[in-house]
Image (cartoon, rainbow, N blue to C red):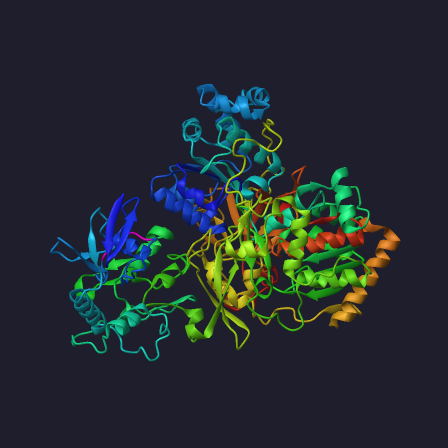
Amino acid sequence: MINITIDGRPLTLEKPINLLEAAKLVDVKIPHLCYAECLSVFAGCRLCIVEIEGRNKIETSCSVLARDGMVVHTNTERLRALRRDLLDLLISNHPKDCLTCDKVGSCELQELCYEYGVKTPSYIGAQTHFTIDDMNPIMIRDQDKCIKCGKCVRVCNEIQVTGTYDFAGRGFESTVTTAFDQPINKDICRMCGQCISMCPTGALQNKQLVGHRPWELKKVRTTCPFCGTGCNFDLNVDVKNNKVVGVTPCEDAPINGTELCVKGRFHTDFISSEERLTTPMIRKDGELQPASWEEALSYTAKRMAEIKAEHGADSITALSSARCTNEDNYVLQKFMRAVIGTNSIDHCART
Amino acid sequence: MSNSVNEVLGSDLIFVIGSNTTEAHPIIGNKMKQAVLKGTKLIVVDPRKTELARMADLHLPLESGSDAALVNGMIHIILREGWEAKEYIAERTTGFEDIVETVARYTPDVVSEITGISEDDLYEAARLYAQTPKAGIYYTLGITEHTTGTSNVMNLANLALVTGHVGFENAGINPLRGQNNVQGACDMGALPNTYPGYQAVENEKSIKFFSDFYGVEMNPKNGLRIPEMMDAAVEGKVHAMFVMGEDPVLSDPDANHVRKAVSALDFLVVQEIFMSETAKYADVILPATCYAEKDGTFTASERRVQKVRKAVNPPGVAKLDWQIICELAQKMGAPGFDFEDAEDVFEEIRATTPSYRGMTYKRLDEENGLQWPCPTESHPGTKFLHKGVFPGGRARMIPVEFEGPAELTNEDYPILLCTGRKLGHYNVTTRYSRLLDSINPYEEAEINPEDAEKFGLGSDDLIRVTSRRGSVVTRIQITDKVKPGMMFMTFHYRETPVNELTQAAYDPITLTGEYKVSAVKIEKVEWKDEELADNVHRFERLDSLVK
């Protein structure tokens, strides 16, 4: 057993975990920008620093495992001053376009600057200027907003296991980029967009969500309609316009966690496609023509009854759908068996 | 799946056969790759050099359709070396003697000859699989979409049972289901031989139960399977068809035969969200809702029933699928179709489907879905199947002989065509997402550099691909992902409807089509007008645009 104290709150752990995770267990939130539970520890942003009694050195809580007897302080004036300085350094080399940045409302850097009262940068000097990469359909890469947390590099290497990104350059010139600095394209990237949801700033933005303020979008949790894996995610809905504008992951999805693929994350424009069928149609004089529900259903009911009377129930068949819900499939099989009187219902499980 | 998706991460060996997991099931593929990074061994059996094959400890690029021989060869080696799970076989299985007798003939030299895999690699695959307790088999349509699909599945079961791999965490036999709710559609009895919950249509007890429950006498004989429906339509025995959310003209094998079938019908109703290729033949089209416009449930591969929640209203006057059918039933004067909402339907599903009985919408919301079997409201659901005992006591092993594919290459049709999916698209719906379509706007048939040279093809060329049944035109991608003499194409594109090439040769038990093996020939073709290359309208057939 490991007994520790974090900000005066006692905690008992069965196995050693890092102090940042341990703090969560007693509702102590330690600020951070480069840490994610599912990724390896980088300890690059230094914001999760803590003081441990008996040690002179300030430690990063993401990279220190809890040891029996540790007494940890996460929010002393010394730590707050250091964090303010770190944030000051970050925004000193950051574009000041927060007023129009699409990340506003979900920008972790902005949130921390707000919390720590960092209003204007005090380290005035050169700023990096990279070319924006938006030649692909899924994201905008604005390296000027990159704070070098490396989460995109790690999620691509460790979760997506593709390795599209890595750090390049040294010091002030260092950046995160692709091999040979190519723009993002399908030959080097699987377009899963997991880097986008990891990015704490506006450096990587989901093109579908650009132009939508996060607080104006309603999130509706659902299950992906494509392959049989069963991923869960949140549909982001522009309620005013009755439109699904994009997808964001939901952490407690039992199968996929925050992982999504290109289809799961970027498919939603098909929902509001202008090619959707919007009205019943009946073939008249060889042409499909719009009809009312009353006409379409009465006509279908009449034809089904006629064909059943003339050729028997087994002359009618149905194809059900592996894309529809259980409820849809249940009702269609019940209809074929109880109303038509045949077992000739099948679906694409075999084709 | 006998086990759950996240058990992949705890496996010591992943045996992938006939599954291009990172493209067809990307998130499960990710988990496999994550496991490999942490030291899990990976064996990939696939004629193509897929992403997983490139990462594998052992890649066995077998001859297409020789899976049964390969598996028998592995069992042969396992028995010869004494690696079988003797106690497990004695306690939990029957039919072992038959297996011993059959695999005796599949000596490594014979199997190597059939499969093209070296004896050393066969031995290594057998050793790794047999000697790793936490070893899971993962397969998809590369196993089932053959004329020997059922045998292939039974044979994988034999391999897993002989080595005692079923009924344990991080092991098992795991078919990764193709569609979001193909598991659920089967569970719900959208099959001609089973009622909801796999209760047999021809079983007296289930006939009585459903006759009582639905208040009408059930038809006591099995219905027709899809290919039989199509044949019967051509023969004039089936007169009407109701199609909900499927596009058989584009996605079933031998498209020209399917077209003939739907044209021959007296009455075709298509309930759809887009004007599909099949809908073009309809007498009545009923506009339905997509998943984002409805409440309900999908059942994932790992048997997890999860909620689908309505986010937006449907376009125009489109209605919920189940609601349309209920209104039709009511028009036909039938009782029992007055459901109030999706939850009301689910309550009836629970009442008729024993494995779903313990699930309620409330529980599904609170517990993030539940895995069947879940027989009572206090049951936590089932993470992996067959722990301790099989349904019916013992698992029966049935030996399988190798039979070659129905169609072989010859002088006239020298190339073997395999079909499947690619990462950027899912069947036919994603073509309507402008964003996804812009990433992969057209078919790119994969062809080996050797063949490209033989036929004088460059990467910007167009080819006509012809089988005994049809002909399509496509762009190409020259890649060593496919072996010489082999091609790979997807079925996502109406511009290049690949199922006009595939054959209506079926597995005799399931009638699943042999999508994975067709003999074809190719020839280089030119655009009628060079400018067409950049100006093809979506869904316009390429074969009408070439000289």
Residue at the outermost left position: A56
Q: Is residue A205 left or right of residue B68?
A: left
Residue B337 in the image: state x and y as whole percent: 74, 59
Residue B25 in the image: state x and y as whole percent: 49, 50
Residue lying at 73% horizontally and 57% vertically, measured from the top left: B242
Magenta-colored span: A39-43
Residue at the outermost bottom position: A99
In the rendered structure, does residue A41 fall within the stretch colored magenta?
A: yes
Magenta: main secondary structure equals loop
* Viewer-closest of B73 and B462: B73
Res. B69 in view: yes
Q: Is residue B398 above or below residue B380?
A: above
* Viewer-closest of A62 and B541: A62
- Res B293 → quadrant: bottom right
Residue A101 in the image: state x and y as whole percent: 34, 76
Res. B530 in view: no
Q: Is residue B263 left or right of residue A104?
A: right
* Viewer-closest of A71 and A95: A71
- Res A107 → quadrant: bottom left
